[in-house]
Every structure is written in structure tokens, then in C-alpha cells.
Amino acid sequence: MTEALQLQLKTLPTNPGVYQYYDKDGKLLYVGKAKNLKKRVASYFTKNHEYGKTRVLVKKIVSIKHIVVATETDALLLENNLIKKYQPRYNVMLKDDKSYPWICIKNERFPRVFPTRRVIKDGSEYFGPYTSMKTVRTLLDLIKGLYPLRTCNYDLSQEKINAGKYKVCLEYHLGNCLGPCEGYQTIQSYDEQIVAIREIIKGNFKDSLNQFKAQMKTYAEAMEFEQAQKVKEKIDILENYQAKSTVVNPKISNVDVFTIVSDESFGYINFLQLSLGSIIRSHTMEIKKKLDETDKELLELAITEIHQRFKTNSKELYVPFEVEVGEKFKITIPKLGDKKRILELSLRNAKYHRMERFKQIKLTDPDKHVNRIMAQMKKDLRLSEEPRHIECFDNSNIQGSNPVAACVVFKNGKPSKKEYRHFNIKTVVGPDDFASMEEVVYRRYKRLVEEKQPLPQLIVIDGGKGQLSSALKSLDALNLRGKIAIIGIAKRLEEIYYPGDSIPLYLDKKSETLKIIQHLRNEAHRFGITFHRNKRSNSALNSELETIAGIGEKTIVELLKKFKSVKRISEASLEDISAVVGNSRAKKIYNNFHKK
């Protein structure tokens, strides 16, 4: 296995999806689906395969591509589409006459709703595909229980109904149909049912639930409790049904989908090709920035390049924003529904590709990884230089007792634990966090300046505007204002505060910059709390010795030198204590800890 292949295996996501194996000539060998892409693909290279053909396949694999999807069901459907399209050598050939089932709402007066495996372009609506007929029948049974629909295939034109050509059948007498064939149900009433059914198939139950709840209330108020109970049963069925997700829609045909994510150095453009309602290709392109190009410029460049490379004939593009790529394309910016979900799927794949590239760089070129993160932090936090050296301060006190503070140090985005420092608050009386922050910041940087130690590029204060203002007073007193960047981070909404600016900065919750700042803040909190807890514990134990009549400070020091802790003193024998402080004091100490 090549190093490149090993790197790909290490950085695969753990999401559901479809993987594709390619040989040295770039030919597609195999398409497979997975609940967990990383686990499934890795199994090919870690297991001893008994089947000879599988061993040959693994030897031929040179590169792996994948498409991330939302569910296992989506992966199964996408795998089916790709196998049919490319017919890879090591896949079982799928016949098109045995395709997945759909639900059809027929294009006719008083439309029928039924399952089918054939999609005919006659204006009818098709929903799916579904992975099994069992799922389809479950959904149709649900619909049948909620709404009475006709099952006959008569031509229910108004003229034929008026002429009395048809008679109601057994379904009418069983209550499964309201008899539109004899004009017992209006077209308007029937179409209202179809609208509700369409929404249920899509997974939108809200309108139907509200309608049934209103019906149940009406029946209950009219004392028709039997009818109200029937409607309640329908509500229960609806609330307990879980809609199945799909990645394809037959209405979306001959369309190319493009999305982009970018950072300081690269743009990552994902391309999905849809044909006859199915995803048949996914590709992510990386473009290195030269002149700080915008996402719009990069996306336009990528669309032109990908169309030339893959020679697609699509006339419509789904994109996240307006682009100028010529008049021959219809540009659509989806806002909701199936089109929006396809765009989100493309964006998800672009983001996963970017994450994998970061992981690969981190493994193969750590310096490059650090450089990228530092450049990103400089941009995100609006700094004049990269924050290679960051220090973060946090106060710890409980109702003013044992006030302490902590300073943690990060170098190149990682903790430098040997440089962490604790502070006992010396000049502040009572629980005053602002004054405590002012003291520790002053002490820290007065010492660094006097010892001519390197100063950080960024100071992070755990707290909001008040804490930040206190720290600034110390920098002013040391004449360091403007020489070191300083920010405050408030806990509640992760707001970043700057000196002299009342409006906070909100970073992307998933950004690496915010993650590093949160790591800093959490380390400072952990380090400070540990020190504070130890100090309180020692203080409580020492005070117990001090309360013993006739035992002074000198005796306590001698005991602690010998036994190291108050706990060991409490567990020591009378003879051991006597050997240190004599019989008289030893009895007082021993009796204090063994009163019972």
C-alpha cells in the first residue's frame, strides 16, 4: 500500500457514504456503500480476504474517492446509481428493469396514489426512490388510513360522472372511498386530500396534524366521541411515523451542482452531476489562491474548468450565489425543498474534503499546518501579526477565600505546560475579580520586562469588558498598551471583546480559531481550579492543627517536615509523633485526631 493511500485511509470521515476505488490509470474498479466510511474502507486493507478476486482488487487500488451523505438509505441509493452509470469491473451488474420502487400521484382527475417501479413522463408526480417495497407499503397504508382515495382506474371526467356511467363499488361501502365516480365527492375536496398526502410523503405532517386536531375538537364538542376517537388514532399514527430521507428527486434532471468553501490559501469546490433525478458523479477541486481571489471568482473559474474536463451537457446550475458563466446556463440559487437539500449535500462534501486535506497536512507537514492555523487566527482576530505566543489569564475564588489566578501559555497553537504559572493574590482583599486581574497581569508582565523575556503576541482574558478593562490598566502602567494585542472572551455566548469597542466579535462556532481560544480558556480554568482546590485543602488541614491548644507554628512545621501532610499525622501512632515533638505535645495531637 502506497503512502498516499495510507494517508487517505487515516483521514476518511466516519459518516455514511459511498466509496470508489481507482487503479493506477484512473479507471473505476469498485463502488461500495458504508454506514461508516473510515471503518468500512479500512477493513479492505486490514483483513485477510479468502476470496481471490477481492485480494486482486485490493492490490490494484491506488486511490480512493468518496461521497458523504446523510443516511445509510441515501448511500444505498447512490451506490445503485453509480454502479448503473459506470458499471465497474468488480461490482455486480445491476439490471435497469429491476429498479427501486416509487410512489406515484397520477396525473388525472381524482388522482390515484399507488406504488410503481416505472417512472413515466406523463405529468404524474413521483416520490422516492425507496430502498424497499415494504417501506412504500407502510407509507401507503398510513395514507389509506388517513384519507379515503379511489383505487379504480376509471376515467372520471365530469361528463361521464354526470351521465351516470359508473356505480360505487365495495370500497365505497367499506368506507375506503367517498364515491367520486357517482359525484358523492367534489373534485375540490379530493384535491385537498391530495395536497395533504403530498406533504405527508415529503415528511411534512404539520398541516395534516393541525387539521385532524381541529376535527377531533369539533367532534368532541358535539359529543361525537366515537368519531373523535377515530381521528385521535389517525393523529397517533401520524405522530409515530418516521419519514425516510432520499438523495434524489426525479424532477431534478440534467443539473450540475456547485458549492465552495475556502480559507486563506485555497478554495475547495464540490461538483455533483445529476441525471434523470440521480447523482451520477461527485468531484472536489482545489484551487490555490494567488491574489486573494473571492469565492465568486474561484467558483466561476472552477465551473468552466469542470465543464471542460467532464464534458457535461447540463443546462441548469445550482449554486449558492450568483455567478457569471455565460448565457447558455440557467442559474438557480435554491432556497428550500429538495433543491436546497442537494446544494447542502454538495457543501457538506466540500467541507469534508477540506477537513481531510487539513488532516493530511497535519500528518505529513506539521509546520505547514501550524503556519496555516496561525495565518487564519491572525485574519479572524484582526491582529497585526501571527499569535505564535499566546497567554491566557483566569481568576479563581469562592466567596473570597484563597483567591488565586492562573496564566497558561500556548506556543504555535499548542499548550506549553512548563511555562504555566500560578499566582496567589496579594494586594486584593475580598472577592474582587477586576482588581485581582489587574494585579496578576501587572505582576506577570513586569517580571517578563525586567527579565527581558519575550512578550506574547496575544493576551486572552477570561471574562467580558470589565475584566478586559482591568487588564488594560496594568498594560498602561507598564507602557505596554499597543505593543501586545489583548482580547476578552465572555463565557455565555463566546463573545470576543476588544479594547475600546463595545460591540463584540462572534467567531464561527466551528472555526479553528475559536477552538484554540476555547482550549486556552479551558486550560486556564482547569489549571486555576486545581491550584485553588489544593490551596483550600491545605488551608483547611493546616487550620485543624492550629486549633489544638498548646501546639504552635514551630511544632506544626516540624510535623509537616516529617510526615509531609496532615492526613499522615492523623494516621500516625503516638510513638511516631512523640519521636518528633515529645510526649506531652504528642498526646495532645494524637488525642485530637482520635477523640472517638
Image (cartoon, rainbow, N blue to C red):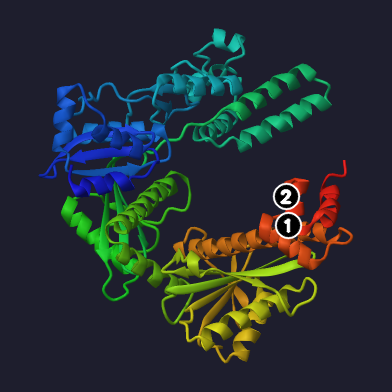
**In the image, residue 480 lies at what x, y percent?**
55, 88
- Residue 439 placement, left or right of 50: right
Q: Is residue 2 above or below residue 482?
A: above
Q: Nearer the viewer, residue 316 or 23?
A: 23
Q: Residue at x 85, y 48 (%)?
A: 591
Q: Nearer the viewer, residue 595 or 499?
A: 595
**In the image, residue 10 lies at what x, y percent?**
31, 46
What is the quadrant of the N terminus in the image? top left
Mark 2 residue crowding within 10 angstroms, few (<14) / some (14–19) / many (20+): some
The residue pinned by badge 2 equals: 576
Q: Residue at x 60, y 86 (%)?
A: 475
The residue pinned by badge 1 equals: 580
Q: Is residue 451 above or below residue 312?
A: below
Observer able to see residue 88: no
Q: Is residue 174 above or below residue 103?
A: above
Q: Nearer the viewer, residue 58 or 275?
A: 58
Q: Quadrant of residue 581?
A: bottom right
**In the image, residue 204 lies at what x, y percent?**
56, 37
- Residue 445 placement, left or right of 39: right
Q: How many marks?
A: 2
Observer able to see residue 203: yes
CB within 8 Å, label 2 to label 1: yes
Q: Amino acid at mark 2?
A: Asp
Regarding mark 1 in the picture, which secondary structure is present there?
A: helix
Q: Amino acid at mark 1?
A: Val
Q: Quadrant of residue 93?
A: top left
Mark 1 residue crowding within 10 angstroms, few (<14) / some (14–19) / many (20+): some
Regarding mark 2 in the picture, which secondary structure is present there?
A: helix
Q: Residue at x 64, y 62 (%)?
A: 531
- Residue 124 placement, left or right of 4: right
